[in-house]
Amino acid sequence: MTIDTIFDESGLDPRRSVRAIAYRIWLALRAHCLKRRTRHALLELTDDELRDIGITRTEAHREVRKSFYWD
């Protein structure tokens, strides 16, 4: 007994896969920019505002210094 496998090549459009990769890269960069912007916004908060959200000035500086690859 043999099992015949049908391989559909219609889903292998190279332009589509390049477009999907580019889109995922764009999403990652957009997420990074948003994280960076919100982390830097911490430095603009007053000590009272930081205390309201439960972090110290030192923790805010540590958060801003996180690398590109940090979640």
Image (spheres, grey):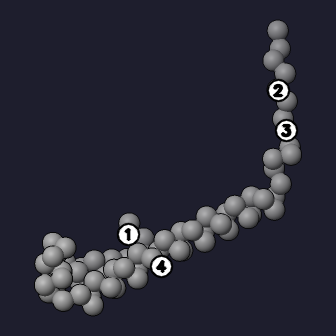
**Mark before the other along the chain sequence, 4 or 3:** 3
Check disc 2: other Cα within 10 Å, few if <14, some if 14-19, many if 20+: few
Residue 22, x across and y down, in percent? 67, 68
Residue 5, x across and y down, in percent? 82, 26
Residue pictured at 28% horizontal, 77% vertical = 63
**Mark before the other along the chain sequence, 2 or 4:** 2
- The residue pinned by badge 4 equals 33
Compared to residue 5, the image places residue 48 above or below, namely: below
Q: Which quadrant: the N terminus?
A: top right
Question: Closer to the camera, 41 or 22?
Answer: 41
Compared to residue 26, the image places residue 10 above or below, namely: above
Residue 27, x across and y down, in percent? 57, 68
**Mark before the other along the chain sequence, 4 or 1:** 4
The amino acid at mark 4 is: Cys
Q: Which mark is residue 8?
A: 3
The amino acid at mark 3 is: Asp
Mark 4 touches mark 1? (CB < 8 Å): no
**Mark before the other along the chain sequence, 1 or 2:** 2
Q: Which mark is residue 5?
A: 2
Check disc 4: other Cα within 10 Å, few if <14, some if 14-19, many if 20+: few
Real-space CA distance between mark 4 and mark 1, rounded to the nearest whole angstrom: 13 Å
